[in-house]
């Protein structure tokens, strides 16, 4: 009957909301943990430590997941600056790809493709793409 169909639709819809809320809660928890890690890294470590790159990169990705694009852009730029300073070619390529994803998620396809191409070329030149 139509009332059973409506009940099933409501249960499925509610289940989806609960599932998405759980995913969001997990992402926000990751952001909190990465922010705490980021705050603990001092300036000397930022200049030389791969952990800084890892934390900044993952913060940026988490912010893309929750559509906080300004924050994602900030952490991608932090990561890129430090990877460039340490000449981490694989990481530089990875960061450009991640910036491409940031633009893709915002619907800026030309910019996304531009950064994907830079990332791919960087990793090819570094010998890190099979």
Image: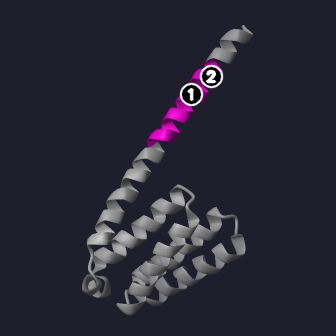
Q: Is residue 83 above or below residue 21?
A: below
Kindly report the secondary structure that dominates the magenta region of the rendered protein: helix
Would you call the spot at circle 1 few (<14 residues within 10 Å), some (14-19), or many (20 or more)? few
Task: Give SS at disc 1.
Answer: helix
The residue under label 2 is 10
Quick check: 48 left or right of 73?
A: left
The residue under label 1 is 14
Residue 89 x %, y %: 41, 86
Magenta part of the chain:
8-22
- Residue 128 visible? The answer is no
Residue 10 x %, y %: 62, 22
Residue with the most extreme right position: 2
The answer to which quarter of the image holds residue 103 is bottom right
- Residue 6 visible? The answer is yes
Q: Is residue 16 above or below residue 48?
A: above
Identified at 47% across, 64% down, the residue is 61
| Quadrant in which the C terminus appears | bottom left
Identified at 39% across, 72% down, the residue is 56
Would you call the spot at circle 2 few (<14 residues within 10 Å), some (14-19), or many (20 or more)? few
| Quadrant in which the N terminus appears | top right
Q: 100 and 44: which one is in front?
A: 44
Quick check: 73 left or right of 22?
A: right
Residue 101 x %, y %: 57, 68
Callout 2 touching callout 1 (CB < 8 Å): yes
Task: Give SS at disc 2.
Answer: helix
Identified at 41% across, 80% down, the residue is 91
Q: 109 and 71: which one is in front?
A: 71
Residue 44 part of the magenta-drawn span: no
Identified at 46% across, 73% down, the residue is 75
């Amino acid at each position: 009957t139509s009332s059973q169909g409506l009940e099933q639709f409501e249960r499925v819809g509610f289940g989806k909301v609960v599932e998405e809320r759980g995913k969001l809660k997990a992402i926000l928890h990751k952001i909190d943990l990465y922010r705490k890690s980021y705050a603990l890294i001092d300036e000397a470590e930022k200049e030389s430590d791969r952990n800084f790159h890892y934390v900044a990169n993952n913060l940026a990705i988490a912010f893309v997941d929750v559509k906080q694009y300004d924050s994602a852009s900030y952490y991608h730029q932090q990561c890129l600056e430090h990877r460039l300073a340490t000449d981490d070619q694989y990481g530089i390529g990875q960061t450009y790809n991640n910036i491409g994803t940031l633009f893709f998620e915002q619907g800026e396809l030309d910019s996304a493709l531009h950064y994907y191409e830079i990332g791919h070329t960087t990793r090819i030149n570094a010998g890190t793409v099979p």
